[in-house]
Image (cartoon, coloured by chain):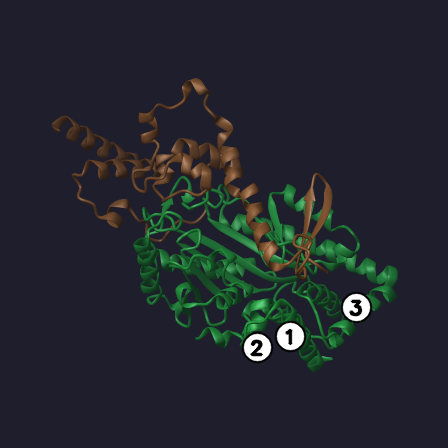
Amino acid sequence: MELNDLISRTGEWLRGTGPSSGAVMSTRVRLARNFIQVPFPNRASKKHLQGILDSVEKAIQKIDHFKDSTVFRMSELDDVDKEFLVERHLMSHEHASNAEGKAVIVSAEEVLSVMVNEEDHLRIQVMNSGLNLFEAWKIISAIDDRLSEELHFAFSPAWGYLTACPTNTGTAMRGSVMLHLPALVMTKQINKVLTAIAKLNFASRGFYGEGTQAIGNFYQISNQGSLGHSEEDILQNINGLIRQVIEQEEQARQALVVQNRPLLEDKIFRSLGILKNAHIMSSQEAVELLSMIRLGAELNILTRLNVQILNELMIMIQPAHLQKIDGNKLSPAARDIKRANLIRNKLGEVS
Amino acid sequence: MRCDDCGKKKATVHLTELVDGQISELHLCEECAKAKSVQMEQQFGLADLLAGLSDFNKTSPAAAPSEAAVKIESCANCGMTYADFKKHGRLGCSDCYSHFRGKLASLLKKIHGASHHSGKSPKVLATPVESAQPPVNDMDVLKKQLQQAVLCEDYERAAELRDRIRAMEQEG
């Protein structure tokens, strides 16, 4: 698989199916793993980093889960390529800087990806569509088991998996769920919900990951603690919390429909009108409008709109994607024009 | 909309900051946003947060460590000092966990509210010996193994290693 093969398609996690796929876009589980006694990437020499990458590449050849996967070495990618992988949620922003010994391994359906030499030697992630924490856990745990037979992971019975940052020590697992919560935002209840989430020791972030603010009513919720509870217990807790948030969102949606359906329909159809007709569009405006028509689709107000197309657009309207599709470097102003074009074309196909 | 910082380029990045309950909005061009994000990281990074947490048990100035004590403070495997860790918020290698065991124990408790792992373990447990394959009579290696054994709560092996180190010290 070449990087350019990814341009025209989207990952399995954007299918728009799976449990509770109305308010839940996708689920992600990630594990951090390190080699015993080899310096963590922040202290590792060039030789160490290369040695780690070589060992990982050798190990994955023996593991079935990696049969159709591709290794993208950072040293072989340009800036737009790297940003493109970040935009697809296959790797972090941090991984795109300082290429030495870094790589990301991506499976054919983009369900599995492994960052090599990010903050930890290995950051393994599994993403799927809808609220699917336990399915994702089953897959990632099996992959982790196989990797631990080939590679020597740093582990202590007292403290679990040993990681570069002590905030990840223990299970070294982070489970996160991407939620679409437009009704909680519109009914001004979102801050109350986010405050409650923070009090329960869960983190919330925007669609584009760590350090980003929530735009277009998308929120990513994940666990904070990783020591003291088993993986299943942590996931059970996230699952319970997410179910409550979904219930709140659904109640808020019903309230919006009952209280002022004409106003809601007006907002949704205006958004569709702008998306189908605008010739210049910033990514922020696009995401906000896409959120509105997504709500319209989920409430069956827009009946011919397919959520998968909206998911695809969320990914494709980003800067590096627009540039990869176009095949050229584009200025922000040129991207705003290409973005509007892309959206008009895609939505023209379906409605 | 123009960039709030340089006032020249078009603002493409929109930040909302919450400071003391006051919401302020900032609209920046790509370049100024990059500069700003570096600035913000420097102002308040994870490292500061961790350093703040681990300073909780600060010793009094009278008990300041001597130079010799500072030397012991560095990890024998990777050379990381606890001061380095406090500065960057990242440990140097898996052995740092045994070298800074005491300090990390209270830090982990503060971060996670728990002090013992519950959950899965690797299918094949690596031991430092098989991974590093050191000559067994090297004192440094034996000390390293001892620390690892203590960390892994393998007290039987730790006692055995301790006795071997003692014997070597007496011979030498």
Q: Disc 1 marks which residue?
A: A338
Q: Where is residue A193 in the image (x, y as percent from the top left)?
A: 71, 48
**Which of disc 3 and disc 2 is earlier in sequence?**
3
Chain letter for mark 3:
A
Q: Disc 2 marks which residue?
A: A326
The extreme top residue here reads: B62
Residue type at numbered disc 1 = Lys
Q: Are marks 1 and 3 in contact (CB under 8 Å)?
A: no
* Residue A89 vertical position relative to residue B73 in the rendered view, above or below: below
Q: Do labels 2 and 3 share a chain?
A: yes
Q: Where is residue A183 in the image (x, y as percent from the top left)?
A: 76, 58
**Quadrant (top left, top right, bottom left, bottom right) of the N terminus of chain A:** bottom left
The extreme bottom residue here reads: A349
**Colour in which chain A is shown?**
green
Chain letter for mark 1:
A
Mark number for residue A268?
Answer: 3
Crowding at mark 3 (Cα within 10 Å: few <14, some 14-19, many 20+): many
**Colour in which chain B is shown?**
brown
Q: Label 1: state its secondary structure.
A: helix
**Which of disc 1 and disc 2 is earlier in sequence?**
2
Q: Where is residue A19 in the image (x, y as percent from the top left)?
A: 62, 64
Residue type at numbered disc 2 = Asp
Q: Do the residues labelled 2 and 1 touch (CB within 8 Å)?
A: yes
Question: In this rendering, would A22 be left or right of B90?
Answer: right
Residue plotted at (78% across, 74% down): A273
Q: Which label lies toward us, 1 or 3?
A: 1
Q: Where is residue B151 in the image (x, y as percent from the top left)?
A: 35, 37
Chain letter for mark 2:
A
Residue A139 appears in the figure: yes
